[in-house]
């Protein structure tokens, strides 16, 4: 996979599951700055889930030359699209376009499988959420245009206690 400055992008390896959870938790601390302490306090993904996603080759990591993992993207192949489930970069590495590069890696993987769309769900107002993804070519999906799978996902979010009124589904079409 490609290099961006001193970074390499590759599928996550089994021994990186704990590191991925640490990055997720650390990146979540940013939400304190926008008053969303519930997210900052949330525990990271279950280790077993991360291991399963690694085994399924559904996590791409950004690693430095010394093999230090500084960010990751986790996705779920669905029919005709990839759903981007999680994108996290260590705050020490924020602002280096690592997140954008990780999304590009997913887009490349999708295109190679004739997949034409990336989808995600994110917070509408948080600066590094929806406004950030719009800069990466994602567009809001209106509630009326959600398909059954996305409505089910929204319902699952609500069941988990997420405030869907503050969230938006977004899509990026891949040429």
Image: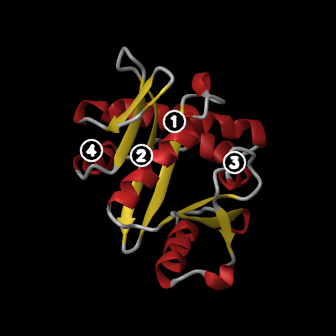
Q: Circle 1 is placed at which residue position?
A: 25
Structural distance between the alpha carbons of marks 4 and 1: 16 Å
Structural distance between the alpha carbons of marks 2 and 1: 9 Å
Q: Nearer the viewer, mark 3 or mark 2?
A: 3
Structural distance between the alpha carbons of marks 2 and 4: 10 Å
Mark number, residue 132? 3
Q: Secondary structure at mark 2?
A: loop
Label 2: few (<14), some or many (≥20) within 10 Å?
Answer: some
Q: Nearer the viewer, residue 18 or 141?
A: 141
The reply to whether discs 3 and 2 touch (Cβ–Cβ < 8 Å) is no
Q: Which quadrant: the N terminus? A: top left
The reply to whether discs 4 and 1 touch (Cβ–Cβ < 8 Å) is no
Please give the name of the residue rendered at 51% of the width and 23% of the height, measured from the top-left corner.
5
Q: Circle 4 is placed at which residue position?
A: 51
The answer to whether 133 is drawn above or below residue 60 in the figure is below
Looking at marks 2 and 1 on the same chain, the residue that comes earlier in the sequence is marked by 1
The colour scheme is secondary structure
Looking at marks 4 and 3 on the same chain, the residue that comes earlier in the sequence is marked by 4
The answer to whether 172 is drawn above or below residue 79 in the figure is above
Q: Circle 2 is placed at which residue position?
A: 45
Can residue 163 be seen in this snapshot? no
Q: Name the residue at the front extreme.
A: 175
Q: Secondary structure at mark 1?
A: helix
Q: Nearer the viewer, mark 3 or mark 1?
A: 3
Percent position (x, y) of residue 172?
Answer: 57, 63
Looking at marks 3 and 1 on the same chain, the residue that comes earlier in the sequence is marked by 1
Q: Nearer the viewer, mark 2 or mark 4?
A: 4
Q: Secondary structure at mark 4?
A: helix
Q: Nearer the viewer, residue 3 or 100?
A: 3
The reply to whether discs 3 and 1 touch (Cβ–Cβ < 8 Å) is no
């Amino acid at each position: 996979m490609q290099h961006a400055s001193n970074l390499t992008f590759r599928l996550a390896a089994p021994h990186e599951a704990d590191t991925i959870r640490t990055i997720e938790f650390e990146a979540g601390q940013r939400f304190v700055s926008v008053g969303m302490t519930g997210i900052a306090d949330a525990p990271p993904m279950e280790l077993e889930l991360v291991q399963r996603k690694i085994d399924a080759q559904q996590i791409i990591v950004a690693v430095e030359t010394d093999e230090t993992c500084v960010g990751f993207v986790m996705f779920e192949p669905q029919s005709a699209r990839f759903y981007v489930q999680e994108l996290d970069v260590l705050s020490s590495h924020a602002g280096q376009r690592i997140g954008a590069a990780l999304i590009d890696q997913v887009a490349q993987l999708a295109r190679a499988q004739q997949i034409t769309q990336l989808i995600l769900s994110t917070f509408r107002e948080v600066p590094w959420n929806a406004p950030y993804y719009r800069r990466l070519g994602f567009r809001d999906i209106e509630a009326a245009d959600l398909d059954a799978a996305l409505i089910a996902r929204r319902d699952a979010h609500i069941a988990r206690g997420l405030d869907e009124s503050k969230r938006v589904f977004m899509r990026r079409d891949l040429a």
